[in-house]
Amino acid sequence: MANPTAAMLVIGDEILSGRTRDANMHFLAGELTKVGIDLQEVRIVSDMRGAIIAAVRALAERYESVFTSGGIGPTHDDITADCIAEAFGQHIDVRDDARAILQALYDRNGQTLNAARLRMARIPDTATLIENPLSAAPGFTLENVHVMAGVPSIFQAMVASVLPTLTGGAPVLSETVRVHLGEGDIAGPLSDAVAVFPDVSFGSYPFQKDGVFGANVVVRGSDADRLAAAVAHLHGLFAEAIA
Amino acid sequence: MANPTAAMLVIGDEILSGRTRDANMHFLAGELTKVGIDLQEVRIVSDMRGAIIAAVRALAERYESVFTSGGIGPTHDDITADCIAEAFGQHIDVRDDARAILQALYDRNGQTLNAARLRMARIPDTATLIENPLSAAPGFTLENVHVMAGVPSIFQAMVASVLPTLTGGAPVLSETVRVHLGEGDIAGPLSDAVAVFPDVSFGSYPFQKDGVFGANVVVRGSDADRLAAAVAHLHGLFAEAIA
């Protein structure tokens, strides 16, 4: 049976401008792989209503789960929650449960729940809150879309809250065989291996560093025995070129 | 006048599985910003024909230039060139000019231009080659799509070959003001600043590290004087919270 599919939508002007290097995608990709959910597409769009709404609609239709990152803070450029609501034709406003969570935090810290902070309690009517153990302001799940913060530590905490609620598949195992041959010499034998192991996926990722070149051949699959057999097959093929 | 727009398509199973952290997107984003081309969207898809073809068509229609990364090597999973040709309804086969470049390299290195390596000479009929000074196998430009390698050093060399052929816009300048206040306290005054400087873009990127929290307020624009005025305005607003 095929694993559940997922996509990610990063709302990230700061990534598109080259100011910041994305960290959330790499984190999420690793976590999903561990639980057997197949991340099939990532889109990064800027903080523009039309772009966010179109992307979330497209991804939510095509994949079983969608994870978003960014744009749920209190400032003028935080428009993700309203865009997600609009994408699903849902009403959104300050919701009492989210407001209570924020009020408790700011009371504890001796801060005021001002108008800007209150924007973080804007949650679509039928959404479920995602706990934020670090800075209280919750994320939310609406339909199959999980809306989370962009700050990496908070994003990671929210992913930890959401993942146990999802049904995973067979965890995907992987092994890497480092072959010291050009990809042009690897390609022929590798194509034969692909044919011998139709239930295993083979990827070839060339590297070139300090004058050393070769390729990491990554085999992936959910059956440990078949994976071991594929690795043994590769060792047989490329014995002299494996350190 | 608005700057030219661009998108990037990363063909990257290894990024979607969490095995590798993308480097090409971050590099391209920085280079495009320098020359005033506005990177508005990035998509990462897996090595599947349908996904690659659909994404390249969508992006090529919507943006002035599209840059792709990955999937143009000699192995079975390198299907990008054929997918790009199909996306534009173009014929693709081994092309003499690309074959000559590869033949010269392998002759020099005493290697054979075998069937797998020859796949790297598959270029759509009307495409223009992109020079690869590192490992010879060329990229290509077809219509408004620039097809480049995934290995970061080669990707970077190809970007350097392509960028001078494009018309840029006004380089986007940016300044960062680090404010030691919660975003909830920054948001109100910042919204006022946004209204005062409609020609400058303001982004607020919260940070939390080692118990220190605040936000980097990034102002962007193409006019250095207006940017300086916006920065001075922020210093006025948040004087006590700027180190």
Image: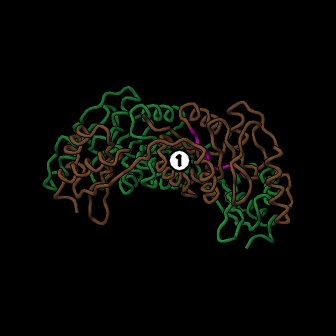
Chain colours: A brown, B green
Q: Position of residue B156 (x, y in %)?
A: 40, 55
> Who is closer to the viewer here, A164 or B2?
A164
Let me know if residue A72 appears in the view: yes
Q: Residue at x 33, y 42 (%)?
A: A201
Please tell me in which quadrant of the rendered image residue B139 appears: top left
Q: Residue furthest front?
A: A225
Let me know if residue B131 appears in the view: no
Q: Position of residue A8 (x, y in %)?
A: 55, 44
Above or below for B85 versus B19: above
Secondary structure under the numbered disc 1 in the rendered image? loop
Q: Residue at x 39, y 36 (%)?
A: B48
Q: Amino acid at mark 1?
A: Gly
Chain to which mark 1 belongs: B
Q: Residue at x 26, y 47 (%)?
A: A230
Quadrant (top left, top right, bottom left, bottom right) of the C terminus of chain A: bottom left
Q: Is residue B172 magenta?
A: no
Q: Residue furthest top?
A: B89
> Who is closer to the viewer here, B125 or A126?
A126
> Who is closer to the viewer here, A178 or B28?
A178
Quadrant (top left, top right, bottom left, bottom right) of the N terminus of chain A: top left
Disc 1 residue crowd, few under 14, some 14–19, many 20+, Cα 10 Å: some
Span of residues in magenta: A65-72
According to the picture, the residue beneath numbered tag 1 turns out to be B168
Q: How many marks?
A: 1
Above or below for A68 versus B91: below
Above or below for A234 versus B210: above
> Taken as a whole, is the magenta stretch helix, strand or loop?
strand
